[in-house]
Image (tube, coloured by chain):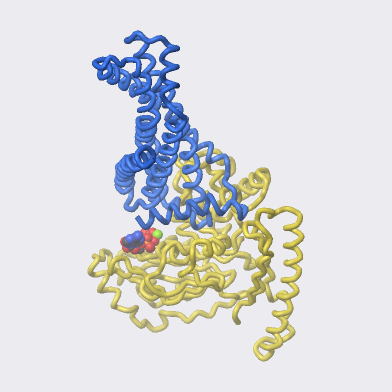
Chain colours: A yellow, B blue
Amino acid sequence: MTELELLGSAGCQPAVAGSLPATLCASTTLLMNVTLGLFSAGCRKQQAGSLCSPEIPLSAFDLRHSFDLRHSSFVILIMPADATIIEVNNLVRRFGDRAVLDGISFNVHRGETLVIMGGSGCGKSTMLRHMIGSMRPTAGSVRLFGEEITGMKELEIERVRLRFGMLFQSGALLASLTVGENVALPLTQHTNKSPDEIEQIVKGKLEMVGLTGFEDLKPDEISGGMKKRVGLARALALDPELLFSDEPTSGLDPIMTAVVDQLTLKLTQGRHMTAVVVSHDMTSAFRIATRMIMLGHGSIVAEGTPDEIRNSPNPEVQQFIHGRADGPIPLNVSQEEHKDLQHVRPRPFLGARFRFHHKHT
Amino acid sequence: MKNYIQLNLSLLYWILIAPFTGQFFKIGPIFRQMVFIGVRAAPMVALTAFSVGVTLAMQAAHSLESLGAEMYIPDLVMITLLREMGPVLIAVIVIGRSGSAVAAELGTMKVSEEIEALEVMAINPVQYLVVPRFLAMLVMLPALTIFGNYIGILGGWAVCTFALDFNTAGYILRALESADTWDLYSGMIKSVVFAWIIITISCNAGLNVEGGAEGVGQATTASVVQALLAMLVMNAVLTGIFFFAA
Ligand SMILES: Nc1ncnc2c1ncn2[C@@H]1O[C@H](COP(=O)(O)OP(=O)(O)OP(=O)(O)O)[C@@H](O)[C@H]1O
Ligand SMILES: [Mg+2]
């Protein structure tokens, strides 16, 4: 079933955002939109009567609304609980004439935690960069929340970006700001919260990642693992519905790894958040994943639930998850060989490429 | 060049149009940049301007003595400083000091993924990083130029009173009589235009760095050279417009 999405714009001038007229105007629109939304959901149900029973309880739908202060508009989403949040279709990315991503397709559904694995340099970070719209693909499409982002203009894509958080592999903290200011940045830029409220939120987020009391240090005064965690706190500052994280646990000790994993599990529980995590760390990956994808020579080598991946007969997968030095994955791939390997499509291992049938429990 | 034009256009958008859609500038970062770009450069500007004032007075004395026209030394110092030397030399100092620093800072942010992180947080880098620097430069370069003019005239005065037999009142009267307000304004217009050129070239160089620390170094050097050239050519053009076309 496709997602039902209703976007209502209050059309108020943002200059008065937060003032009484705007609030009144916006709340009227909210009411209207809820009514309209329920109405159209009802119509859909009538039409789709043969597909889904008309007695579907409303709780089967996630009714979400968020007030976007910057544009003074309400975004009402009424979507079935298993809505597709990310659709990547036949994504191709070349650097020069080397195709790093060569026709990749997958979907991510609401509430899932998708772990992307694969050898170093196989294009995991590049994959994420295409999903957040900071790289444009050579071919193919990426849809976030049902919107095609590959051809979007900067101003349009900002609207989509407000709905997700991203943790970069390097942390990517602003070196000129303190840890606290870094976490506060999305809040000061995108909300009208008072400095006190922001301070409280920042405290809370830093506590979540185990960094209470480090607010006033500069990024170059903290360790690599701490930077990662500050980056995670910053990505979560706006309570996003979707989180991308690039190796959130690399450089962390086993205890902190567990803390970060538990945080991801807690946030994705009850389908409040969807997560796409790139990870090398197999313990952590199997702990948080509801589904896994393994990338290799530009395409998807294997895809499935953690159990399916663990029991996969594909020798590449087995070599990777058990971390063996010898196996089918070549150790040194020169540029030319890399090009050749791309033409070797993933061999049709029996049962290696799983059809995805993920059931929410 | 395409990037440069794009940067200018989006700068214009954020300065002229965005405030009317409710996205005002934040004052704090502008003041921080003003201190960095302007206030910290003041001692260097003072030293440069003083030396220029002294040199101008000595050269003027040397040439005018043979004509027996020493009384015009203050005129020469004043006019040269206000119209040409003031805006140009102070722009040179600001390019070397603040322009290169801006290019290096933004370049480092680019290579360490900070700019990308800003974009992904839906924060426009032009709005967040370039606008405060631009406004600070647009205010501070003319301010530094006025400050430098004063100091330069002080340099001329020092030569006139200590080495030649001028008295202070005579120097000031002569200097004030020689220049009219247009001399001052033309210099101010020049320094506003220079401010625009310097900061957009530096920011553009920084935002388009590619290739790690080496790229940052190259972009910084390139931004200094380009800003100097553009500034000097623009100076010739403006002098032509102001003093020949009229
Ligand atoms: N801007 C770029 N220009 C040219 N090649 C690039 C660029 N970015 C990435 N690549 C190439 O793309 C490939 C994949 O890079 P990517 O950073 O996505 O790897 P990764 O899977 O994230 O590796 P790791 O696990 O080490 O982080 C690399 O071989 C790299 O050479
Ligand atoms: Mg990576």
Above/below status of B67 relative to A313: above
Above/below status of B56 relative to A266: above
In the displayed structure, does residue A128 sit left or right of residue A202?
left
Residue at position x 42%, y 56% in the image: B6
- Regarding residue A200, the answer to whether it shows in the image is yes
**Foreground residue among B170 and A84:** B170
Above/below status of A262 relative to B58: below
Above/below status of B123 relative to A359: above
**Foreground residue among B74 and A75:** B74
Q: Quadrant of residue B102?
A: top left
In the displayed structure, does residue A289 sit left or right of residue B48?
right
Q: Quadrant of the N terminus of chain B?
A: bottom left
Q: Residue B239: x and y, percent?
A: 35, 38
- Regarding residue A251, the answer to whether it shows in the image is no
Q: Residue B209: x and y, percent?
A: 35, 51
Residue at position x 38%, y 35% in the image: B91
